[in-house]
Image (cartoon, rainbow, N blue to C red):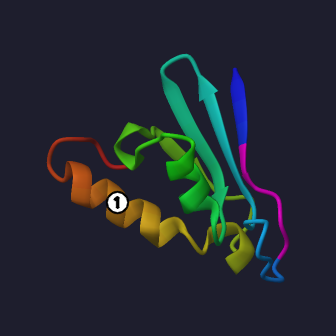
Amino acid sequence: MKVTLLGTGSPVPMQNRASSGYLVEIGDEMLVFDHGAGAHENFLRAGKRAVDLNSVFFSHLHTDHCLDYPRLVHSRWDQGAGKIPDL
């Protein structure tokens, strides 16, 4: 298992930290837990693609935990519409 911290910040915007986001890889399975502001940019920096994700989970729906989710969904749709299963 590999865990990548995509963001460890808070609701207060910071230049050097993204809000909550975690990538968990177990074999070929790739899971995202939370996807707050800035997490998607770090997801891309980690060399990952939205179409490779299997599941997304949210600890709760505060913006600092889910603000980049629309970017993730749009990227996934743009890169794999009709070719990959829904999240």
Residue furthest front in the image: 15
Give percent across and percent down for residue 80: 22, 48
* 20 lies left or right of 73: right
At 78% across and 68% down in the image, what residue appears?
A: 16
Tell me where residue 14 sits by quadrant: bottom right
At 62% across and 69% down in the image, what residue appears?
A: 66
Secondary structure of residue under mark 1 = helix
**Residue 37 seen anywhere in this rendered image of the structure:** yes
Foreground pick, 45 / 69:
45
Residue 44 colored in magenta in the image: no
Q: Is residue 21 above or below residue 54?
A: below
Residue 9 colored in magenta in the image: yes
At 24% across and 60% down in the image, what residue appears?
A: 78
* 61 lies left or right of 12: left
At 55% across and 69% down in the image, what residue appears?
A: 68
**Which residue is label 1 attached to?**
75
The crowd level at tag 1 (other Cα within 10 Å; few <14, some 14-19, many 20+) is some
Residue furthest top in the image: 27
Give percent across and percent down for residue 43: 56, 50
* 70 lies left or right of 1: left
Magenta-tinted stretch = 5-10
Question: So how many labels did they put on this image?
Answer: 1
Q: Is residue 14 above or below residue 5?
A: below
Foreground pick, 35 / 12:
12
Tell me where residue 12 sits by quadrant: bottom right
**Residue 62 seen anywhere in this rendered image of the structure:** no
Residue furthest left in the image: 82
Foreground pick, 6 / 58:
6
Q: Is residue 26 above or below residue 87?
A: above
> Which three-letter amino acid code belongs to the residue tagged 1?
Ser
Give percent across and percent down for residue 65: 70, 68
Image quarter of the N terminus = top right
